[in-house]
Image: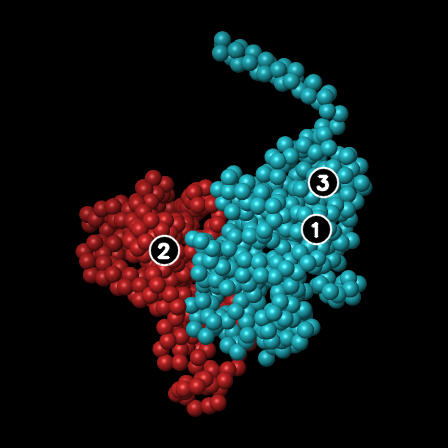
């Protein structure tokens, strides 16, 4: 079988400067830079989803299959609000708030009774959240129909920015900056505030935390909502980049789980590093060995877990 | 106790009433209604296409008052779901339990291949208004299977000719979804384009559910004249948007398969699709009275413009009813029904003249369309018409069929580096 996707051979463009020595260097540099950049920006997008999931998964031990649906519904809400107000950022905010409220409602009503580490709970959670996911998908089909939508980004985020000989799509630059901002905010909240300290205590040992007078229930409710808010933000950003369509929630969910497990459950830094790793591996895998794209994604995961079952930044 | 008695009483009464109603009804019509099973996705990823197909079929049947040749038409609507397995179960149920005279519909190519096998096994005619799959009417053709759709290779053949002759492209990159319809469209394009003297220098197969097309676009040879694209649906939107935002590929022209810029996707594609050209057997903008009638009806009943899904099953239902009319409603004579389904000819359908070749595939007009702004929205403007296109293009069917079907490795990429 002939290779189906080859790295194209390029000729040096006028005025292009090559740092390394060698005839093919500028072509190679262009290829590697754009592929790495794509990988990082895709990773940044995945972080918006995985960041929230790792909090929910780590702090509450909830296997939330409906997490992708939060992303989907965030996208739809963002789409509607942006269409009404014409403001991209208002749309992001509204989606976050809406999905957050949804999270505040779902956790105590459906999930409270099956939290904790008793055997069999994770299976119940999966079934319940799966049900919620299907419910959300069908409701979206009812409200918005099955047609895909695309969120229009402001004009300054369209097209590509040229830096030296390289082109960088502006929307991807925005996603990276945005993900870093979110990471820093949550990291500060998680690591530097007293609520964050209580939260970390709950992640490590909820019984002990409860014994110390921390209101574990309220913390849990808050964490679930926070995870949902992040996911709602991510939905709008993601959908302005890839479009919203039914089914997208289950396409993106496995990647988020891979990242959370790879980075270590409950670890925000782990989720960030994991996101970039998955983004870059997925990108290079697709570009270099498109037939093996799932292998190149899951093989590193298997190897890392074989040596460090708790994930890169997880505590055992 | 009194409640219980009255409950039993009501049940008996309802039962008797039903019997009374039923007896004269079955006595009046000698043979009962003509039963058609219609399978289309109503849930899952392709739900919107399926719902459009059903709307199109229903709108047509309403214009005929669900009657043909003096007999009532009864349609049993079934959900195709999101995979061939559901479609197969539903087809078996329709044939064995509901005893339908004909199975119609089906959206996915994979489901069409699977249901075709069931219909051949159970000896029931299958009519496909929309779904493709080259081999269904080529190497695996059967008298039981007829269709009015486009197959993957049709899209590619027409686009390949147009790209070489009208756009003057000589070097292209082909990108397609990594399953049958992608191989067939890109293969058809390559076959015609290279037979004219062009070169396809890269063939890229993208996995299903690709979220990010960045890596594929960054790998494209920047020296090609254009891109042939068979990545459709939500993925198609992602591809065109990423391509538009990339640096050196953003200026390249795109020729694509018809579904990529279907009217359903135009609002979401927005400016991204401006200038994208597609070869297809329909455009909502086709200027003829029948199409205008359909568009007006769709606006009135569904609140939206006509599209591929709606128009295909509209014509498909028209075709089926004409076939039944031609045999005076005698669908119980199956041999006659099968022949009639292939023998219909339409001189003035909503998309031009239609007839079928001996393999059960339509000989139909193809339109090269370009996405333009129209008022506040977008439309597929027809810029060239290819009349009476055969699934074998200009080749002789026997020669064509002696070659293997277009697949992942065929035709081989001779000019790939």
Relative depth, front residue between B158 and B22: B158
Measured Cα–Cα span from mark 3 to mark 2: 49 Å
The residue tagged 1 is B354
Which numbered disc, 1 or 3, marks the residue that appears first in the sequence? 3
**Disc 2 and disc 1 on one polypeptide chain:** no
Q: Which mark is residue A236?
A: 2
The residue tagged 3 is B322
Relative depth, front residue between A295 and B36: B36
Picture coordinates of residue A75, whole percent (x, y) = 38, 52
| Quarter containing the N terminus of chain A | bottom right
Chain letter of the residue carrying label 1: B
- Identify the residue shown where x is 51% and y is 60%: B371
Chain letter of the residue carrying label 2: A
Element type at mark 1? strand
Q: How is the image coloured?
A: by chain
Picture coordinates of residue B188, whole percent (x, y) = 66, 65
Q: Is residue B329 above or below residue A96?
A: above
Q: Which mark is residue B307?
A: none
Which chain is cyan in the rendering?
B
Residue A39 seen in render? no
Q: Which label lies toward us, 2 or 1?
A: 1
Picture coordinates of residue B391, whole percent (x, y) = 71, 59
Task: Chain A: give its colour.
Answer: red
- Identify the residue shown where x is 53% and y is 82%: A9
Which quarter of the figure has residue B105? top right
């Amino acid at each position: 079988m002939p290779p189906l996707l080859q790295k194209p051979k390029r000729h040096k463009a006028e005025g292009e400067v090559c740092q390394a020595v060698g005839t093919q260097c500028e072509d190679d540099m262009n290829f590697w830079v754009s592929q790495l950049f794509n990988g990082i920006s895709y990773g940044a997008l995945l972080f918006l989803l995985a960041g929230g999931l790792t909090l929910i998964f780590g702090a509450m031990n909830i296997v939330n299959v409906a997490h992708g649906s939060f992303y989907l519904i965030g996208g739809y809400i963002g789409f509607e609000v942006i269409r009404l107000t014409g403001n991209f950022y208002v749309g992001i905010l509204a989606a976050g708030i809406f999905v957050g409220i949804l999270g505040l409602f779902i956790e105590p009503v459906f999930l409270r009774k099956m939290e904790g580490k008793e055997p069999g709970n994770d299976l119940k959670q999966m079934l319940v959240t799966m049900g919620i996911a299907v419910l959300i998908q069908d409701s979206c089909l009812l409200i918005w129909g099955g047609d895909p939508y695309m969120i229009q980004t402001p004009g300054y985020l369209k097209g590509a920015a040229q830096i030296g000989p390289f082109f960088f799509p502006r929307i991807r630059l925005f996603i990276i900056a945005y993900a870093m901002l979110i990471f820093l905010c949550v990291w500060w909240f998680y690591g530097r505030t007293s609520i964050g300290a209580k939260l970390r205590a709950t992640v490590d040992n909820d019984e002990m935390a409860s014994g110390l007078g921390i209101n574990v229930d309220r913390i849990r409710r808050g964490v679930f909502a926070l995870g949902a808010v992040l996911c709602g933000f991510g939905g709008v950003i993601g959908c302005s980049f890839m479009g919203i369509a039914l089914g997208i929630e289950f396409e993106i969910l496995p990647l988020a789980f891979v990242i959370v497990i790879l980075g270590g459950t409950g670890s925000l830094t782990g989720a960030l590093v994991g996101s970039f790793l998955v983004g870059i591996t997925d990108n290079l895998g697709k570009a270099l060995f498109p037939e093996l794209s799932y292998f190149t994604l899951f093989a590193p995961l298997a190897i890392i877990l074989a040596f460090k079952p708790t994930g890169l930044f997880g505590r055992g | 106790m009194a409640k219980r008695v009255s409950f039993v009483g009501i049940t008996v009464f309802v039962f008797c009433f039903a019997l009374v109603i039923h007896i004269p009804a079955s006595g009046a019509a000698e043979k009962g209604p003509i039963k058609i099973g219609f399978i289309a996705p109503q849930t899952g990823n392709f739900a919107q296409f399926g719902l459009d197909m059903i709307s199109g079929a229903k709108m047509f049947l309403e214009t005929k008052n669900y009657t043909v040749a003096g007999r009532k038409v009864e349609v049993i609507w079934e959900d195709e779901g999101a995979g061939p397995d559901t479609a197969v179960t539903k087809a078996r149920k329709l044939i064995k339990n509901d005893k339908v005279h004909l199975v119609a519909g089906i959206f996915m190519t994979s489901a069409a291949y699977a249901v075709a096998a069931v219909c051949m096994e159970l000896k029931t005619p299958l009519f496909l208004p929309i779904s493709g799959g080259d081999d269904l009417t080529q190497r695996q053709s059967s008298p039981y299977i007829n269709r009015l759709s486009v197959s993957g290779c049709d899209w590619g053949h027409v686009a390949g000719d147009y790209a070489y002759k009208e756009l003057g492209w000589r070097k292209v990159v082909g990108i397609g979804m990594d399953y049958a319809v992608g191989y067939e469209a890109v293969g058809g394009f390559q076959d015609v384009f290279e037979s004219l003297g062009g070169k396809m220098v890269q063939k890229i197969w993208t996995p299903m559910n690709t979220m990010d097309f960045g890596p594929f676009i960054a790998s494209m040879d920047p020296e090609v004249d254009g891109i042939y694209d068979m990545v459709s649906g939500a993925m198609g939107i992602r591809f065109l948007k990423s391509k538009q935002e990339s640096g050196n590929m953003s200026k390249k022209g795109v020729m694509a398969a018809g579904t990529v810029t279907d009217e359903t996707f135009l609002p979401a594609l927005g400016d991204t699709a401006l200038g994208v050209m597609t070869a297809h057997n329909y455009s909502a903008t086709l200027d003829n009275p029948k199409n205008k009638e359909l568009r007006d009806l769709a606006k009135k009943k569904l609140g939206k413009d006509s599209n591929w899904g709606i128009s295909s099953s509209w014509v498909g239902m028209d075709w089926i009813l004409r076939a039944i009319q031609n045999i005076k409603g005698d669908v119980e004579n199956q041999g006659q029904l099968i022949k009639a389904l292939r023998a219909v000819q339409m001189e003035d359908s909503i998309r031009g003249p239609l007839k079928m070749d001996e393999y059960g595939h339509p000989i139909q007009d193809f339109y090269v369309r370009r996405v333009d702004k129209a008022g506040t929205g977008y439309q597929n403007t027809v810029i060239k018409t290819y009349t009476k296109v055969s699934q074998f293009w200009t080749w002789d069917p026997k020669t064509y069929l002696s070659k293997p079907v277009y697949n992942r490795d065929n035709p081989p990429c001779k000019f790939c580096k």
